[in-house]
Image (spheres, grey):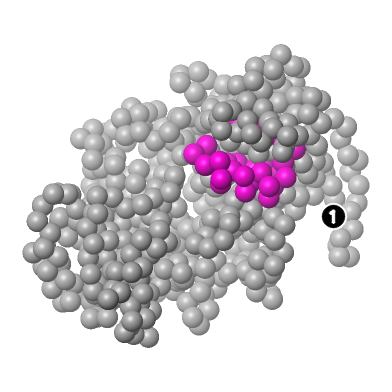
Amino acid sequence: MKLLSRNSVWKFGIRKIASRENNLTVRARMHEDPNKVFVIDDGKKITYGDFLKRAGQYVASLHQHYKISKGDRILARVSKNVDAIALYVACLRLGAIYVPLNPAYTKQETEHFVKDASPSLFVTCNESADKEFVGKVQHVLKESDLSASTSKLSPNLDVENLESDDVGVICYTSGTTGLPKGAMLTHGGLSSNAEALIDCWQFSKNDVQLHCLPFFHIHGLFVAFNCTIFSHSTLLWRPKFDVSDVIKHIPESTVMMGVPTYYSRLCGSSKLSPDLCKTFRVFICASAPLPDEVWKDFQKKSGHTILERYGMTEAQVVTSNSYSVSKRAPSVQGKPLKGVDVRITDTGSIEVKSPSLFKGYWKNPEKTAKDFTQDGYFITGDMGQWDKNENLVLLGRSKDVIITGGLNVYPKEVEDQLDQFDEIEESAVIGVPHSDFGEAVVGVIVLYDRDGDKTELEKRIIIDLKAKLAGYKVPRKLIFVKELPRNTLTKVQKNEMRKQYKDLFKS
């Protein structure tokens, strides 16, 4: 690969420099300490130097054999292993655009990504499902075959020159309507967020991060991974979250990032204790609201408070609670990160301006324009307010706000009350069509005792809620289910429940 010259580029009257220093992998200085342990994978220790050679083998293969270069899209439906990291880093070093896919996506879902991203290469861990895309994509490769062939090559350690706003990753985001949209995340945006986070969370080279998140989503792929490479620390690489596996590896770690379900399930282990967690520095949670009871239970059993933060694919991490958290108020997501500006409109809408904001939606300028204000703020779709300490308090997604009889109900407020009942394991509050009120408040409940009598319990819950909440906020109906519908990151899918119960009050 021939590197570009360090040429000046003029855009909109602004002089920009194409330079290798703008490449995320160079800005992270991954090459700085080649003997430092980068990944521990099933006991095997891989140094930064050895890993960069492995990534260099992928660079050589992608560039020489498949003619991948700057701007080409690489669709990656891959397993969570060290070679998946090497493929990702190789794409960044080449200036190619990495497009992660959930291995669980169906054929129909995958067809949309293939058509929309127009990839030059599709690397798959599911050859039987993806062989039909041969002919639709120039190259479709089985990940194990690519891994085997790259291991025979000499590493190419070149790095493509880039501008800071060159796209490094397209991450598809799904909404309640329409097909998933590709958020274009830049090398500069990814780097600036990582630098702000290691400062906010006090990451150092001595940290060992227990990584059990998926590697196809912003949480595991950017937030967790980038905090490690920018602090030159170590990843304890696990294929997935499993309670017994996490309990086993906690004594070897100092940091873990997870979603609320992870911490809820860890609380169910009799082995979770302050002594087990004595080497730990911080547990971090995001991707969904953390119930107050889980936070309190985890603190009691582990001796550690869970640090919460707020973000989304398009903006990465926006706000975070401070590193030293001694107490917690529900839904408080902390203060904006360094360089991030957050404002809340008169209607409660959260808007963000940040160096880590995405560049726009791939091939969708109309949606991009719609989601930005004229002065450059991204409209998140979330609702919030500031507390007395100028911390952001989340009230929920704007699409989740229930308008009943002309009054707004924020589901999280009702869910917090429901989750205090000893019988309730978890809850979700939604709005469904109602001929009189427009929308009616409905609580969808999972009980610890799935088979117990629910009639008297429902009456008692409603009576209790009426003493705690304004009448219009109290659910008109409770629905008891065995489990709530969730996506692959365990986030509750309220849009699915709204569809399922849309005829609940039809006569």
Give 335 or 131, whichever is nearer the viewer.
Answer: 131
Q: Residues within 10 Å of mark 1 (few under 14, many from 20)?
A: some
In the picture provided, is 320 more to the left or to the right than 116? left
Q: Give yes or no for residue 108 being in the magenta stretch.
A: yes
Quadrant containing the N terminus is top right
Residue at image location 56% in from the left, 41% down from the top: 107
**Picture coordinates of residue 58 (x, y %)?**
71, 26
Residue at image location 32% in from the left, 34% down from the top: 243
Q: Is residue 426 above or below residue 212?
A: below
Residue type at the position of mark 1:
Lys
**Picture coordinates of residue 343 (x, y %)?**
55, 73
Q: Give yes or no for residue 398 being in the magenta stretch.
A: no
**Picture coordinates of residue 356 (x, y %)?**
64, 56
Q: Quadrant of residue 4?
A: top right
Q: Read off the residue under disc 1.
A: 16
Q: Quadrant of residue 20?
A: top right
Q: Quadrant of residue 108?
A: top right
> Can residue 453 be seen?
yes
In the picture provided, is 210 more to the left or to the right than 440? right
* Segment tinted magenta in the rendering: 97-124
Residue at image location 75% in from the left, 38% down from the top: 120
Q: Is residue 428 above or below residue 189?
A: below
Q: Looking at the image, which residue sits at the far top?
A: 152
As helix, strand or loop, the secondary structure at mark 1 comes to strand
Residue at image location 52% in from the left, 20% down from the top: 45
